Image (spheres, grey):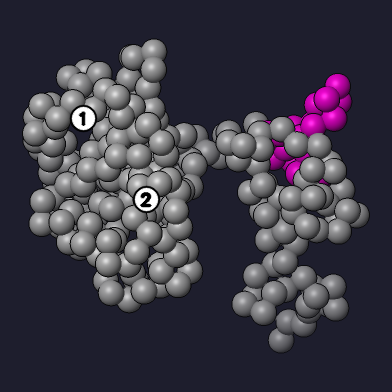
């Protein structure tokens, strides 16, 4: 029987996970759209980890290419290894390959940004987007994780939630206010999800961020689960009610064909 050394035992969390790996990933997770370049002191402050541990983690992550260090500014940023793995992860998702031609066509017709969202745990992630040619446009960052309950894409991804899943979401994430029009009550969310299931699409205006609007339709898998959302996103002041029925029809047809190719 294999035995573990004292150091190995200390490195294991109660669930069998390796603590040092968790800490390294936590440090990488500090970098986001609002924190692209950080000093050592800022990383220590945001991570709330011992300064000595942070220093060793940063040295290792920098050496392995997960972080870059600019000697002139003395700031860290995400490194080339992260970019490589991110691109590789996107390429490995067949759904992107299936959906991309449809997204290009929708963008050509609407000249608005078209995005593809999936769910990871209780967050939504944009895994692909085709941007509008307008100089002023609204779009999500590829790879960014955001709350599900804000916006049309989130409603679509939550539309096939069971009661237990919705209970868990409420307990673990809550219906936080992201803007003045975010749905923050359980009853509001339930009604929005019911309507999304009934209509086969969702519409939102300034629910996740101010001056943005979105229309989303589900993409299903072989188990009839909404595994992704095909979404048009645009600035609110370009939201034209007369175009919405045409765009919904366009999204629905594309969503159904992508779903069919995805095993639905």
- Which quarter of the picture shows residue 91? top left
In the rendered image, residue 78 lying in the magenta stretch gets the answer: yes
Q: What residue is drawn where x is 17% and y is 47%?
A: 201
Residue with the mark numbered 2: 182
The residue sitting at 52% across, 38% down in the picture is 86
Q: Is residue 198 visible?
A: yes
Question: In this view of the protein, can residue 100 be seen by the observer?
Answer: no
Name the element at disc 1: helix
Left or right for 94, reference 169: left
Residue 149 picture location, percent across and down: 36, 55
Query: Could you say where residue 199 lies in the image, as x and y percent from the top left?
Result: 10, 51
State the residue in front, 5 or 158: 158
Q: Residue furthest bottom?
A: 1
Q: CA distance from mark 2 to mark 1?
A: 30 Å
Q: Does residue 63 belong to the magenta stretch?
A: yes
Q: Locate residue 87 relative to residue 56 in the image: left or right.
A: left
Residue at 79% across / 32% down in the picture? 75
Quarter of the N terminus within the rendering: bottom right
Upstream in sequence: badge 2 or badge 1 = 1
- Looking at the rendering, the stretch of residues picked out in magenta corresponds to 58-79
Indicate the position of residue 56 as horizontal and vertical percent values.
86, 50
Identify the residue under disc 1: 102
Q: Is residue 111 above or below residue 219?
A: above
């Amino acid at each position: 029987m294999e035995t573990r050394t004292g150091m190995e035992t200390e490195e294991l969390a109660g669930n069998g996970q390796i603590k040092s790996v968790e800490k390294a990933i936590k440090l990488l997770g500090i970098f986001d759209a609002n924190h692209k370049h950080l000093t050592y002191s800022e990383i220590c402050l945001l991570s709330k980890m011992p300064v000595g541990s942070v220093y060793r983690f940063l040295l290792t992550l920098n050496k392995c290419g997960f972080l870059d260090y600019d000697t002139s500014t003395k700031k860290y940023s995400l490194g080339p290894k992260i970019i490589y793995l991110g691109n590789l992860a996107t390429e490995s998702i067949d759904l992107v390959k299936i959906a991309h031609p449809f997204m290009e066509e929708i963008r050509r017709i609407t000249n608005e940004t078209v995005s593809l969202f999936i769910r990871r745990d209780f967050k939504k992630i944009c895994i692909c987007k085709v941007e509008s040619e307008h100089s002023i446009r609204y779009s999500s960052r590829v790879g960014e994780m955001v709350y599900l309950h804000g916006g049309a894409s989130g409603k679509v991804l939550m539309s096939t939630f069971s009661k237990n899943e919705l209970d868990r979401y409420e307990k673990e994430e809550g219906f936080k206010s992201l803007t003045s029009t975010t749905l923050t009550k359980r009853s509001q969310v339930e009604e929005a999800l019911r309507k999304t299931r009934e209509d086969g699409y969702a519409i939102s205006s300034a629910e996740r961020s101010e001056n943005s609007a979105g229309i989303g339709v589900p993409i299903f898998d072989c188990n009839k689960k909404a595994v992704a959302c095909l979404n048009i996103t645009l600035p609110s002041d370009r939201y034209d009610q007369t175009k919405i029925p045409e765009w919904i029809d366009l999204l629905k047809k594309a969503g159904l064909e992508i779903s069919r190719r995805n095993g639905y």
